[in-house]
Structure formats: C-alpha cells, structure tokens
Image (spheres, rainbow, N blue to C red):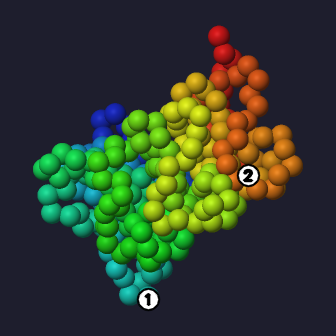
Amino acid sequence: MSLDWLRCDGACFCQDVAGTEHFPTMPHRQKTPILLPDSSGLKFSSISAGESHFVAICTNGTLLGWGMNGHGQLGRPCRPEQQETLMTRLPLVLPAGFAPQEVYASGFSTFVTGTFSDRIPTLFTTGANLFGELGVGSERACWFLTEVTDMKGVRVRAIKGGLHHTLLLDASGDVWAAGRGDSGQLGLGDRVEHTSRFKRVELPEKAVSVCCSTSGNQSYVITEGGSLYSFGFNCYGQLGLKCDDGVVKIPQQAPLKSRKALLIGAGCQFAVLGATQRS
C-alpha cells in the first residue's frame, strides 16, 4: 500500500508503507514522503494508487505505471513468470488519439477518463475483472485499456473500488455500481448478485462523494444535503446504521443527528467519517 500526494507544481510525493510493492528503489518502510522515484523531469496532473500498483498522467499526456501487473492493471499482458515482477515507470498504451484527463486506481484495476477529437467523455479500464467490476460486459480480465462502452458520454467525477466491486460517481450526481454484490455492496437490492455492467444506484438525492472499503464489501455515499448512505457487509457495524443486519442490500441513511457528512474513508471492518454541525 502507498500514500501519494500531488503538489501544485506537478511534482509527486509518495510514502510506501508496505515495503517495495510499488517502487523497488525505496527502503522497506518509507516513514516520510519522498519525491516519486524515477520521476526526474516529469510533471503530473493526476495520480492514483491501488493495492500493489501506482498510475499517473503526465502533463505531456502520457500515462505511466509502477508496481505489480499480475492482473493486467498496468495495461499490458505478461507471461506467468512475470506476474510477480515489479514494473518501473511502465508506459500504458493509450488508444490512438485519446487524451487522458483523470486516472483512478482501485485494488487490482485502473480506470482512465478522457476524450478523442469528438470531445465526448470516454472511459477506459484494465485489470482484474473476476466479478465484472470493470463494467465492460464480461468477467474476463482486461490486459489492455478497454472502453467501458455503456458509460460513453458520461462525465465521471470519481471512481472508487472495493475488493471486487466498483462505484462510479458522475458529474450530475448519479451513482453507478458494477461487480460483486452478494453482500449488498452494489446497493441494487436482492435483484442483482453481481453485474458486469454499470447500473444506477437508487438514492433519494444527488451524491457528491462515494467511497468503498479498500479491501472489503462496503459502500458509502455522501449526498448534496450532507446525508450519509451506506450499504453492504455490516457484521461489525461498519456501516454506522445502528442495526444488527449482517448484510444491507439497499442504501440506508446513517443516523448523524445534527451533523452534516463531509468525507468518509473505510477499511475492511471500520469506517471513519468527517462531519460538521449543521447550521
């Protein structure tokens, strides 16, 4: 796992807390942020880190990756004996004429937004896809950047990935889900156990933020009015709903009393919420 910061001048700093999974030249435990290795002369406009890979868009329009590629998350095939090989500053092959804008890494996959000359928003993805979490209409891993055709024309605001599911927030405030849903983490109710295409999650108001448990099966949505909705695995009360249900399959509003939700982060068995008092 790594923590990464993008400075306003385009420089990238990283802090790897699990050894050399992303950057082979770093010490076993990097306790303070340092300049991204192998990035001399590069400036970045978008960065993101997954479970064991790191991706970044340069200001010159190239897309680079570091770390593991055992599931195709760096956008190119590799032989079985190479799956545990650390990759250093590997360029991902972009479709001809595609200009990347934002990059999002989840556990073992990568999503890239951008446009062609027609200026229509387009989403590409690559990586692990065991339960259809890439949203491309199949459950086969993608070893090259592959277009998510169902989301053509949709302006993406954020993408978050859990263990085997993905949440997408679009610019209009709608939330979409794909992947594994047997613990309710898609928020689509009993009718969908898993889906290989993005489906819209029904919510009472528009969303401004989404979050998935980084290595689990929980999902969270913050709405325009500051309400928090959560769904998925809840055996340890990590959804914050004050209920004993082990699985919650449709979005439920968390009781925040007089507080307004601002941001949320989640691990496998817990969640942390930032909130403020309502005026």
Viewer can see residue 166: yes
Residue at the image position 70 percent from the left and 41 percent from the top? 252
Q: Of helix, strand and loop, which one carries label 2?
A: strand
Q: Quadrant of residue 85?
A: bottom left
Residue at the image position 66 percent from the left and 44 percent from the top? 251
Nearer to us in this view, 58 or 228: 228
Q: Quadrant of residue 216?
A: bottom right
Residue 277 horizontal/vertical position (percent):
69, 17
Q: Total of numbered circles in the picture?
A: 2
Q: Say which quadrant the N terminus sits in.
A: bottom right
Q: Amino acid at mark 2?
A: Val
Residue 89 horizontal/vertical position (percent):
32, 64
Please tell me whether residue 278 is drawn above or below residue 34 in the rendered image.
above
Nearer to us in this view, 151 or 71: 151
Q: Say which quadrant the C terminus sits in.
A: top right
Q: Which residue is mark 2?
A: 248
Q: Is residue 39 left or right of residue 54?
A: left
Q: Which residue is mark 1?
A: 81
Other residues around mark 2 within 10 Å, as few (<14) / some (14–19) / many (≥20) = many
Please tell me whether residue 88 is drawn above or below residue 77 in the rendered image.
above
Residue 180 horizontal/vertical position (percent):
59, 65
Q: Is residue 229 left or right of residue 129?
A: right
Nearer to us in this view, 7 or 260: 260
Mark with earlier residue (2, 1): 1
Q: Of helix, strand and loop, which one carries label 1?
A: helix
Residue at the image position 53 percent from the left and 74 percent from the top? 130
